[in-house]
Amino acid sequence: MEAYVEVEEPTTYEKIKFIVNTVVHELKTKPQISVGILGMMVFKIIQVGNTQFGTVFVSDVFEKMGKTEEEAEDYLSEQALISPIVSIVVTVITAYFSDRMQLWKLLSIIGVISIAVYTLMLNDIYTNHYQRITIKYDIGFLGITGLLTGVKIIC
């Protein structure tokens, strides 16, 4: 005759405590996970802000320049056409380096480049006092869009 031993099911509190302890342990022992999570959060915020702000900004500047709404839409369409091309190039480069470097180093490099192109874009905005758009804005906008896609791939 076999004896059966009943095993108590862990309570919800115990399950949550186990999950939290496991997550904290992994974050402490593997810093690249923390860097990846933080990097992804920052880039998501930038992506939403950049996309929403860019559309409103371009429309406003084109209006101040005396151009029509259709011209602003054409400009935004061109950026929307070029952005995926830039994203493909950045994704290929990021994928190449993701096999050859540690994740946190790659994200740090992408972060520094992102700050540089974003600064270039903001410099154009402030220098021209919201009156016109130059190539610096385009490089910044397309650069940050491409870099965000690269981060999505490695995170």
Image (spheres, rainbow, N blue to C red):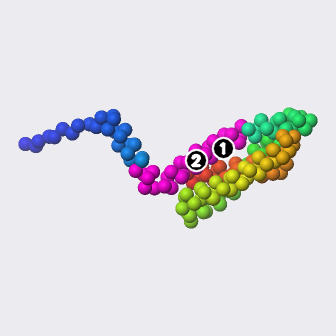
In the picture as drawn, the residue positioned furthest to the bottom comes out as 100
Q: Is residue 72 visible?
A: no
C-beta proximity under 8 Å, tags 1 and 2: no
Q: Which picture quadrant has residue 107?
A: bottom right
Taking the spot 85% from the left edge, 41% from the top edge, the residue there is 129
Q: Is residue 101 visible?
A: yes
The residue pinned by badge 1 equals 46
Taking the spot 70% from the left edge, 50% from the top edge, the residue there is 144
The residue pinned by badge 2 equals 40
Range shown magenta: 25-52
> What amino acid is at disc 2?
Met
Helix, strand or loop for the magenta stretch, by majority: helix
- Magenta segment includes 26: yes
What x and y, as percent, mark residue 1? 7, 42
In the picture as drawn, the residue positioned furthest to the left comes out as 1
Q: CA distance from mark 1 to mark 2?
A: 10 Å
Q: Secondary structure at mark 2?
A: helix
Q: Is residue 50 left or right of residue 12?
A: right
Q: Local crowd at mark 1 within 10 Å, few (<14), some, or many (≥20)?
A: some
